[in-house]
Amino acid sequence: MIIQKEKFLNNVLFNGIQDMVYIMEVTKDGNFVYHFINLAVKKLAGLTDVIIGKTLHEVLDVEKADFLFGKYQEAVLTKDCIIYDDLFPSPLGETRYGENVLTPLFDDDNRCTHIVAVVKDITERRIAEEAAEDAHEMLLEGKQRYQSLFDYNLDTVIAIDQQGMIIAANHSLELATGYTQEDLQGIHYTSLVKPEDVPEVEAYFEIAINGILEEFSIRMRSKQGKHIEMIVKFTPIIVNEETVGIYAICKDMTEQIKIQHKYTESKNKFEIIAENSGDLITMLDQHGKITYVSPSYQDVLHAEPSEYIGQDFYHNVHPDDIPPLIESFEQSKTSGKAWVAQFRQKHQKLGWIWSELRGSPVYNHEKTFKQMVVLSRDISLRKNYEDKLKYFAYHDTLTGIPNRRFFNIKLKEALDDHESTGERFAIIIMDLDHFKSINDTFGHDIGDKAISEFSLRVGKRIRSVDTLARLGGDEFVLLLRGVETKEQVIKVADSIIEAVQKPWQIDDAKFVTTTSIGISLLNKDQPNTFESLYKNADQALYEAKNAGGNQYSIKM
């Protein structure tokens, strides 16, 4: 029954999660073998249960396998969660982005046995981020090039006689069109103009001869056959009060027009991204003041976007998270590296929610910081997943109390405190007498409930500073902190025996049972270790059992 419940919980936890979940087994020779994949892996990555039992290098290409092997090794060595972004192929053949969280799990000997990898598909967010960054880079580049063209480019000047024949031109025309002075001698000016624009330019030429000046645009043809966008102004050449020709003053606007198109395009893209993105897009000035927020603030935080304009970037951020945010913002400004942080911000209905931001610092041509483009998103669900994984790693699924792994952490803390402060403690190992007969008589379902009831009865007889954990089956272990005398420990043991021997009724089953208790006390003459404390408690439990049960025995 326990196994069925664990399967059910695993199914709910892993196959009910929309993110991809891999469980990798760490072999004794340091390799990583696929142990479990959830439905999201099969749907989004196209993998099947065929890979179960295979290593990374048996399933993936060498480069990918080597990369993942390094990440999993890092999780094992650091004994901490590893977070990184990676690419993965979808069943449709496209490459998608995934945010990976690796959580190592350890056995009683502190050896990493498994790694849980949760992979979130962040393709759409990455596309939005890259598009937003590209749009702003294009915008900055466009402004700089646009300004540069106006400040430094020289206009083209062409001298034309009354019949429209080219007399001369400055060097800028050659730079713009590729035509040399020799190429232009004796040809009609309309030879430089795109045929579709000739009627228009001839009309402007006639009115210019008559003294009427107009500015217009045409498309010139270069020597290589390319079209050049020109703004042209015809100015009469007057000699002795007589118009003898025309100066055509031409400004090459090809690059400006392209840049204007890019500027408009990038601006439109940014507006589309900002207005349709599910993430929060924020613009900060050089002082960290908010100059723009996306409409998604209304949907994500239920907040009015206008409320944020002019505020410090940490507006509505949890007070505890403000100092590290300020520090990381300043570091990003100085170093030019991306600003990455996790923090809590206020949701108008839900209270504090966990968010993650990524900021891109923007500099002008003088390398002076001008603004920060920030994308942030709600990661409450991911935090919840992490908490659940951590809970299941350190708690017994049947009773809900801590497991052996958690107990060992607490025991190490007690040993360290005893070493540094002299605080005394004791551990107790206990089980139900004749538990097998309960299972045989009433069935495993009643047996499971009896185990849970046993943990409740014992839990009511101990303090909040003490730690009760299930070792497995009907065997439990108890850590008593701050006990100075053997009598204090015996008093707790007697209280537990009294609680357990009271009549039991679980569903329709009525019975009486007892408990046997093995107590391990600190030894003043020999070193106290995990092994010695467990061994003494286990031997004491064995002696209590052999003596008929329903009693305790002490070793030290």
Image (cartoon, rainbow, N blue to C red):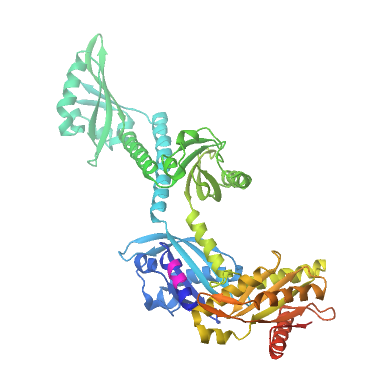
Q: Position of residue 427 (x, y in %)?
A: 72, 76
Q: Check the picture and name the quadrant holding the C terminus.
A: bottom right
- Residue 43, above or below 356: below
Residue farthest along the right direction in this orientation: 525
- Residue 51, above or below 133: below
Q: Evaluate whether residue 193 shows in this view.
A: yes
The residues colored magenta run 8-12
Q: Residue at x 32, y 37 (%)?
A: 261
Q: Nearer the viewer, residue 10 or 498?
A: 498
Residue farthest along the top direction in this orientation: 241
Horizontal side of 483 relative to 217 (left or right) equals right
Horizontal side of 457 relative to 556 (left or right) equals left
Q: Residue at x 71, y 64 (%)?
A: 465
Q: Residue at x 54, y 75 (%)?
A: 506
Horizontal side of 125 relative to 544 (left or right) equals left
Q: Which quarter of the figure has residue 415?
A: bottom right
Q: Is residue 10 magenta?
A: yes
Q: Evaluate whether residue 31 shows in this view.
A: no
Q: Nearer the viewer, residue 459 or 381?
A: 459
Q: Position of residue 101 (x, y in %)?
A: 50, 63
Q: Position of residue 199 (x, y in %)?
A: 14, 26
Q: Position of residue 416 (x, y in %)?
A: 76, 69
Q: Which quarter of the figure has residue 405?
A: bottom right
Q: Nearer the viewer, residue 381 or 279?
A: 381
Q: Residue at x 38, y 76 (%)?
A: 49
- Residue 355, above or below 201: below
Q: Is residue 3 magenta?
A: no
Q: How many marks?
A: 0
Magenta-highlighted stretch: main secondary structure? helix
